[in-house]
Amino acid sequence: MDIRWLEGFVVVAEELHFSNAANRLGIAQSPLSQLIRKLEKELGQKLFDRSTRSVELTAAGKALLPEARRILSTMSEARELVSAAEGDIVGTVRLGFSGVLNYATLPRLTSEVQQRLPLVDLELVGQVLTPEAISMLRQGNLDITLMGLPINDPDVETQLILTETFCVVLPADHELAGSEVVDLSDLSGEGFITTPEFVGSVFRNTTFQLCAEAGFVPRIAQEVPDPFLALLLVARDVGVAITTEGTGWLAPPNTVMIPIKQDSLRLRHGVAWMSGMERVARDAVLDVIKDIFP
C-alpha cells in the first residue's frame, strides 16, 4: 500500500469534494481519483459514495479514517525523529486560532517560529472555536491551538500566554467619546453590536456580563460573526461595542476606544495541546511560545 493513497484518502474524506481535495494536494483530479480507486481495490471495499452532487464516506471509509490519520501521524513523527537525530527540526505543525482573539499574539508567534525554526512549516487554521478546537486536537487535525482559558479537559494541557482587559468602542461623535473612562450604565440606552449566541462566544458573553455588572441588560442592535466587523459598524453609528484592549487599538477611523469602569473580567489567552504525546516539531513550537510569552 502506497502512503500517498492514504494521504489522498484523508484529504478527500476531510473535503468531501474531489476537486477541492485535488487543489489542496496540488495535483489534478484524475490522478487523485486513481489513487482512491487503487486504495479501494487494495482493501476490497468501497470507501466513498459518489454522485454528481455529493461525496460521502461509506461505513468502511468511516472506519478507515481514524486509522489512516494515525498511520500518517506516525509516519510524520518518524520523519521528525530522524531529522532531529541529525540536528534538524523538520515537520508541519497545525496551529488553530480564532481570528480576532489572536491579533495580539499570532503575528509575533508566526514571525518567531519562522526565524527560530526555518524548517518547520507552521500551518495556520483559522476561525476555530474552543469546542471544535478540542475535537480537532483529539482527532490529530490540530497540533496546537490558541484559545481562551480556562478549559476543563484532563487530556489537554494549557498555558496562559496573555491577559487582556476589556474596553468600549464608540463612534467618534458620541457624547462620551472624550471621556477617560466610561461607566457602562451610561450606555444602557444604546444598542450594542456583538457576535451571535453560540458556545464559546467570548465577546457576546462578556458584553452581557459587564452590562449586568453595570445594572442592565444590553439591547442588541446588530449581531455579526466577526468582532472586527462589529467595530466597522460602530464607525457607521450602528451601535457601540465591547471588545478587548488589543482589538480596540485596531478600531477604524471615526471611532474611539475608551477603558470602562466595569473591569472585573479579563480575557485570558492561552495555548492548548494534547498531553501525553511527544512530537518533535510541535514541542519545538511550544518551546518558542513559552519563551516569548513567559
Image (cartoon, rainbow, N blue to C red):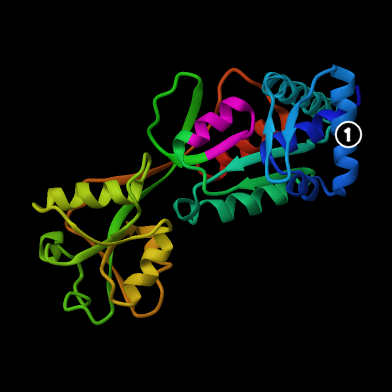
Residue 143 counted in the magenta span: yes
Q: Position of residue 180 (x, y in %)?
A: 20, 70
Residue drawn 31% across the image and 52% down it: 165
| Left or right relative to 212: residue 72 | right
In the image, 102 versus 293, the foreground residue is 102
- Amino acid at dot 1: Leu
In the image, 59 versus 66, the foreground residue is 59
Can you tell which quarter of the image residue 79 is in? top right
Residue drawn 50% across the image and 24% down it: 156
Work out which residue is located at the far front of the displayed protein and give it.
52
Residue drawn 85% across the image and 18% down it: 43
Q: Is residue 91 visible?
A: yes
| Left or right relative to 29: residue 61 | left
Give the residues drawn in magenta, as a range.
132-145
Q: Position of residue 101 (x, y in %)?
A: 44, 51
Q: Quadrant of the N terminus?
A: top right
Task: Give SS at disc 1.
Answer: helix
In the depicted structure, whether residue 228 falls above or below residue 137: below
Residue drawn 83% across the image and 49% down it: 26
Q: Position of residue 46 (x, y in %)?
A: 79, 24
Residue beneath disc 1:
35
In the image, 24 versus 120, the foreground residue is 24
